[in-house]
Image: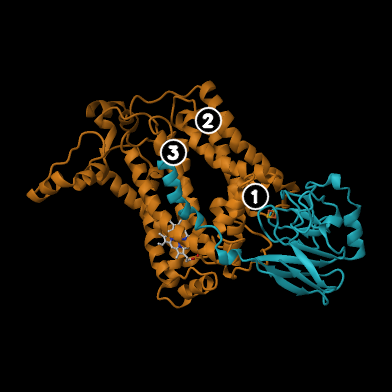
């Protein structure tokens, strides 16, 4: 009884640290993709994190597709728009192949990776050297997971809503 | 604190106090007549220096808190205002920021001293363990403090360190969110870090009290590592060690002041004079120098969870030290084998610190530093968990002197003193 009481009394003091309702209220952003040419990437802020939106070239899409999923360190899509069990195949990482939308947070310790660097043409995280490919999948370094894909939808061909 | 008290109240008033709150008795017994080995050297003055450092941080910190604003939108500017507008704000901030480095410099000397002279061995295990606890609290305090100016290093340092918790399986990411109070390091994080940065130094002060209390039960160890056997082995703390401590404190303050006045940003990172930007990580993020060895360990392991375990393990190991050392002799002065491995250990720590400051893919003379850091990390653990227990068993220590007095005064003088 005393333990239950103590736990009940302690809980408000623990839970106050969690995000408040205001922080939880999912924010959304709408982005106009028209100015982003193939081979370019833009960075937008979403929920306090950078968001990478990359207009991939056919060559980049090709190189992402060619990879054998079985050889990847993280075999899962990590895509909020697909079932949790979806594989890390490039098709499951995107909605439209030319647009790659990612949360720009290294899955190692949270730095923002730099685009168009590293051995795989995707991203290189300077903090501890994790490398991601043109599908945002982890290929080398200490990061355990692929870069996460946020929930998003195309409103028109050139407008996307994230969140 | 322990042992029979030698205090005799001198006036009616002192007697009245003594019967109600024997605080003067406590001060008298701990700081005046406390019997202290007569052979303590310079390395034993750092306890007093550390107490001084804590006092300086608390004093300057309270002043900074009068001008500082714990808000993600205002913090950076408020620190700049301290530097430019507040009267002597630059001085107080530079004392506080360099004070943190001086504090760690002193604590590392203090810890290596303990390691060399075997001060962690029975009956001083708890003194050592409480000390490691203080060291942990200091690291937490300094980390929280470094976040407060809300520069680029503040922000990204906070991001990387809090993300260490996300390595914990299953609950990790919830813990990280709980620490942040948001989905990323932000305003909520800054506020709670300020609250904790204000609190922890006072907790440290309390734990320092326990540290000294525990010290005053067996008394000081000494460079010979042998027990005090007779009153000839000791001198009263005052005036002998109050004066010695004060002298070396003055030298320490000269070094401290040199940094504050002539190289105030020597330990700092220029990136921290840029306001936090959640969208851009600086190309090279490095922690403060005193955390570099652990950072190098983290980076040398290519797996997230293992990296965090190794880094944490390096500190947790220190708690077990009293039982890892199997030698009957305390001081390395009489341990020819251990002495060499001790110095190799010190070098390994410096190498780790150096590697931690370089970028991950750096090389020196063609040798990748990543591998150098891996070897040094290996040695760190090897030293404590394998070498220490074994060396204690196989080593033949040198002959110990009969007593402290005999070693300091020579045979005849010691005999005469008896
Ligand atoms: C164990 C003792 C302490 C340590 C090791 C410590 C360490 C630090 C460090 C490393 C910084 C960042 C310095 C910079 O780059 O600007 C800092 C900032 C700060 N600290 Fe402390 N601190 C201690 C005690 C305190 C106390 C007791 C207070 C207040 C009651 C305090 C208040 C502040 C404030 C307001 C700042 C932000 C202003 C600034 O960045 O200079 N500190 N502290
Ligand atoms: S945070 Fe990206 S590699 Fe560590």
Is any atom of residue B356 visible in this view? yes
Where does the C terminus of chain A fall, quadrant-wise?
Answer: bottom right
Palette colour of chain B: orange
* CB contact under 8 Å: marks 1 and 3: no
**Residue depicted at 40% across the width and 50% down the height:** B204
Q: Earlier in the sequence, mark 1 or mark 3?
A: 3
Q: Quadrant of residue B73?
A: bottom right
**Residue depicted at 78% across the width and 67% down the height:** A153
Marks 2/3 same chain: yes
Mark 3 C-beta to ligand 1 under 8 Å: no
Q: Position of residue A109 (x, y in %)?
A: 66, 54
Where does the N terminus of chain A fall, quadrant-wise?
Answer: top left
B172 or B226, nearer to the observer:
B172
Is any atom of residue B353 visible in this view? no
Q: Is residue A22 above or below residue B413?
A: below
Mark 2 C-beta to ligand 1 under 8 Å: no
Which chain did the renderer colour cyan?
A
* Alpha carbons under labels 1 and 3: distance apart: 28 Å
Q: Which chain letter matches label 3?
A: B
Q: Secondary structure at mark 3?
A: helix
Left or right? Give the position of B290 relative to A96.
left
Q: Residues within 10 Å of mark 3 (few under 14, many from 20)?
A: some
Instruction: Please name the residue that numbered disc 3 is placed on.
Output: B129
Q: Which chain letter matches label 2?
A: B
Q: Position of residue B247 (x, y in %)?
A: 34, 52
Left or right? Give the position of B306 relative to A2.
right
Instruction: Please name the residue that numbered disc 2 is placed on.
Output: B338
Q: Earlier in the sequence, mark 2 or mark 1?
A: 2
Q: Secondary structure at mark 2?
A: helix
Left or right? Give the position of B380 relative to A9.
right
**Quadrant observed for ligand 2 in the rendered image:** bottom right
Instruction: Please name the residue that numbered disc 1 is placed on.
Output: B355
């Amino acid at each position: 009884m005393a333990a239950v009481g103590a736990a009940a009394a302690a809980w408000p003091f623990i839970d106050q640290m969690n995000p408040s309702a205001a922080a939880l209220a999912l924010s959304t952003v709408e982005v106009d993709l028209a100015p982003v040419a193939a081979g370019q990437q833009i960075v937008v802020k979403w929920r306090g994190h950078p968001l990478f939106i990359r207009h991939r070239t056919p060559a980049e899409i090709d190189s992402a597709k060619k990879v054998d999923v079985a050889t990847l360190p993280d075999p899962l899509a990590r895509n909020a728009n697909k079932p949790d069990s979806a594989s890390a195949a490039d098709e499951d990482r995107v909605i439209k192949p030319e647009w790659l939308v990612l949360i720009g947070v290294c899955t190692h310790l949270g730095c923002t990776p730099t685009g168009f660097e590293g051995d795989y043409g995707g991203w290189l995280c300077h903090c501890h050297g994790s490398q991601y490919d043109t599908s945002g999948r982890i290929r080398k370094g200490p990061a355990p997971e692929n870069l996460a894909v946020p929930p998003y939808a195309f409103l028109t061909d050139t407008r996307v809503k994230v969140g | 604190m322990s042992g029979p008290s030698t205090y005799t109240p001198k006036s009616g008033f002192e007697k009245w106090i003594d019967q109600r709150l024997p605080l003067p008795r406590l001060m008298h017994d701990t700081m005046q007549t406390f019997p202290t080995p007569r052979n303590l050297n310079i390395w034993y003055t750092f306890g007093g220096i550390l107490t001084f450092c804590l006092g300086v941080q608390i004093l300057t910190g309270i002043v900074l808190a009068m001008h500082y604003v714990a808000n993600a939108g205002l913090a950076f500017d408020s620190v700049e205002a301290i530097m430019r507008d507040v009267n002597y704000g630059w001085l107080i901030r530079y004392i506080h920021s360099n004070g943190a480095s001086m504090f760690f410099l002193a604590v590392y000397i203090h810890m290596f001293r303990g390691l060399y002279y075997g001060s962690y061995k029975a009956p001083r295990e708890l003194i050592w363990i409480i000390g490691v606890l203080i060291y942990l609290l200091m690291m937490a305090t300094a980390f929280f403090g470094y976040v407060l100016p809300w520069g680029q290093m503040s922000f990204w340092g906070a991001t990387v360190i809090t993300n260490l918790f996300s390595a914990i399986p299953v609950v990790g990411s919830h813990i990280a969110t709980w620490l942040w109070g948001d989905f990323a390091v932000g305003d909520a994080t800054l506020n709670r870090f300020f609250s904790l940065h204000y609190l922890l130094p006072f907790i440290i002060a309390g734990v320092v009290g326990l540290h000294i209390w525990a010290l005053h039960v067996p008394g000081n160890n000494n460079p010979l590592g042998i027990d005090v056997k007779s009153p000839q082995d000791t001198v009263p703390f005052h005036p002998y060690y109050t004066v010695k401590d004060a002298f070396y404190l003055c030298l320490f303050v000269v070094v401290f002041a040199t940094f504050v006045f002539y190289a105030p940003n020597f330990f700092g990172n220029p990136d921290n004079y840029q306001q936090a930007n959640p969208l851009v990580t600086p190309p090279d993020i490095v922690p403060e120098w005193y955390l570099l060895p652990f950072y190098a360990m983290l980076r040398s392991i290519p797996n997230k969870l293992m990296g965090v375990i190794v880094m944490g393990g390096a500190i947790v190991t220190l708690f077990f030290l009293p039982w890892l050392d199997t030698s009957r002799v305390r001081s390395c002065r009489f341990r020819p084998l251990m002495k060499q491995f001790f110095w190799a250990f010190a070098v390994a720590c410096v190498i780790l610190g150096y590697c931690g400051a370089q970028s991950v893919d750096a090389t020196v003379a063609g040798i990748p530093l990543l591998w150098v850091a891996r070897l040094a990390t290996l040695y760190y653990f090897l030293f404590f968990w394998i070498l220490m227990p074994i060396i204690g068993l196989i080593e033949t220590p040198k002959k110990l002197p009969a007593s402290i007095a005999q070693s300091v005064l020579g045979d005849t003088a010691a005999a005469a003193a008896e």
